[in-house]
Structures are given as C-alpha cells and as structure tokens.
C-alpha cells in the first residue's frame, strides 16, 4: 500500500527539492533504526554465534551488491527515459522481494519487532513508488501503464511476505535469525549507499538545477 501511495504523489504538483530530500532521509532513518534496534538484536538473541551472524549480514550485503550489479548492466542497454524507467522498476522489484520477508520473519520472532519493521519498510516504500511513477510520467507513459509498473514493485513485496508466511511452520528460529540479519544488511546498505547520499545531495542543491539530473536519463 505504501508503494502504491507513491503513484498519486507523483501525479501532483512538483515537490520541492528539500521535501524530496527529507523524505529520503526520513526513510533511511526509519530503516536504520529498525535494523539496529529491532532486527539485529532479535536475530542475535537466537543466533548461534558472532561468526554465523556476521556471515548472514555479509550475505545480505551481497544480495544488495548483486541487485546493484544487475541494475548497472541493464542501465548500459537502457534507451532514454523509457529504458531508465524499466531499470528502476526492475531494481526496486528485485529488492522488494527480500524486504517483503522482513516483517513476517520479524513478527515470527516478536510481534512488536514485526510492527516496527513493517512501519520502517513502509516509510521507505513511498519514495520508491514515487520514483517509478515520476520516471514513467516523464517518459510519457499513460496513467494505467504507470500504475501497473508501481503495482509490479508492490506485488513483489507481497510475494516475498507470502512466501515466508506459507512456509512459516518449517522456519526454525535459526533460519528466522538468518533472514532477519540478511534483510537488515540489505536495509542498511540501501540507507547508507543510496538514500542518505541522495538526500544530502538534494539538500545541497538548495533549489538549484543539478548538473546531473536527479532522474536518470540517457545522455
């Protein structure tokens, strides 16, 4: 629902640079807080040791790097805004699948942790949906097609959550802890490598036109 909320927001009047920056930074803060305060401590409480925990944090970071690599390879073959829209949609859809597992896995460990994790993910899903919709509108896509692209990204998160929910009976506490650590690493990587740098860059613009477009275009 939060991802889909980005669609009507993109269709409204253009938001200020400062507003967009604050949205990104707020989303990053929520994800960092959920990872550090909720997910990682909950996982460490039931995990088998620091070495095992560090391994699954590394696995999560590896998933993030793989998604970025796939996005970069697709970007090389993207043509104009239509290609950029496709790349962004695919990238966000891919990373929404493991995100979808986070709230269910966290709630399986502790309901409060699950609620906090769900709220944090929802906050950062709004600018994700907005990014896809803004690019699609800029590329000249129809409202129906634009909504479809945003919906694909949202459905991916639902599928990730449903996959964990259906198999929850076979999930051991150890597997749950591994999932929490991997998703926490993905969320931290997104926050520190993408959301925070982009938010700071937007704040530094101070209403000026950036030399490099915020929305990726084909030069």
Image (spheres, grey):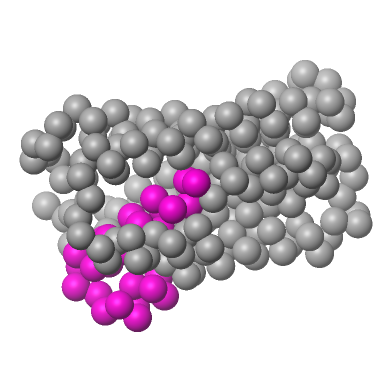
To which quarter of the image does residue 19 belong? Answer: top left
Q: In this rendering, does residue 132 appear at all?
A: no
Viewer-proximal residue, 202 or 149?
202
Question: How many numbered badges does the structure rendering display?
Answer: 0
Q: Closer to the camera, 111 or 142? A: 111
Q: Residue at x 63, y 26 (%)?
A: 36
Residue at the image position 47 percent from the left and 70 percent from the top: 151
Magenta span main SS: helix
Observer able to see residue 199: yes
Question: In this rendering, would 129 be left or right of 14?
Answer: right
Looking at the image, which residue is at 29% across and 28% down?
200
> Residue 153, image x and y in percent?
48, 63
Q: Nearer the viewer, residue 211 or 59?
A: 211
Position of residue 192 measured from the top left corner of the image (x, y, whole percent): 44, 29
> Can you tell which quarter of the image residue 155 is in?
bottom right
Quarter location, residue 186 = top right
Numbered range of the magenta stretch: 123-149
Q: Is residue 132 left or right of residue 65?
A: left
108 shown above or below 181: below
Residue 142 horizontal/vertical position (percent): 26, 79
Left or right of residue 131, residue 176 in this image? right
Is 77 a magenta residue? no
Tell me the residue at 90%/55% (across/down): 170
Query: Measured along the vertical axis of the image, is residue 102 above or below residue 199?
Result: below
> Residue 135 colored magenta?
yes
Horizontal and vertical percent position of residue 137: 24, 68
């Amino acid at each position: 629902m939060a991802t889909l909320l980005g669609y009507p927001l993109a269709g409204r009047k253009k938001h200020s640079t400062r507003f967009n920056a604050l949205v990104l930074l707020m989303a990053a803060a929520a994800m960092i807080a959920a990872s550090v305060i909720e997910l990682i401590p909950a996982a460490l409480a039931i995990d088998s040791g620091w070495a095992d925990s560090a391994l699954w944090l590394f696995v999560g970071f590896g998933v993030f790097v793989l998604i970025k690599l796939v996005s970069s390879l697709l970007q090389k073959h993207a043509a104009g805004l239509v290609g950029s829209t496709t790349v962004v949609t695919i990238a966000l859809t891919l990373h929404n699948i493991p995100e979808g597992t986070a709230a269910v896995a966290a709630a399986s460990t502790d309901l409060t942790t699950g609620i906090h994790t769900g709220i944090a993910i929802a906050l950062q899903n709004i600018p994700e949906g907005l990014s896809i919709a803004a690019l699609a509108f800029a590329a000249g896509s129809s409202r129906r097609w634009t909504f479809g692209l945003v919906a694909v990204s949202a459905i991916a998160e639902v599928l990730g959550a449903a996959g964990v929910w259906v198999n929850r009976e076979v999930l051991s506490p150890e597997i749950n802890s591994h999932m929490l650590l991997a998703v926490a690493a993905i969320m931290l990587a997104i926050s520190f490598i993408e959301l925070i740098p982009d938010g700071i860059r937007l704040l530094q613009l101070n209403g000026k036109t950036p030399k490099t477009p915020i929305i990726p275009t084909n030069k």
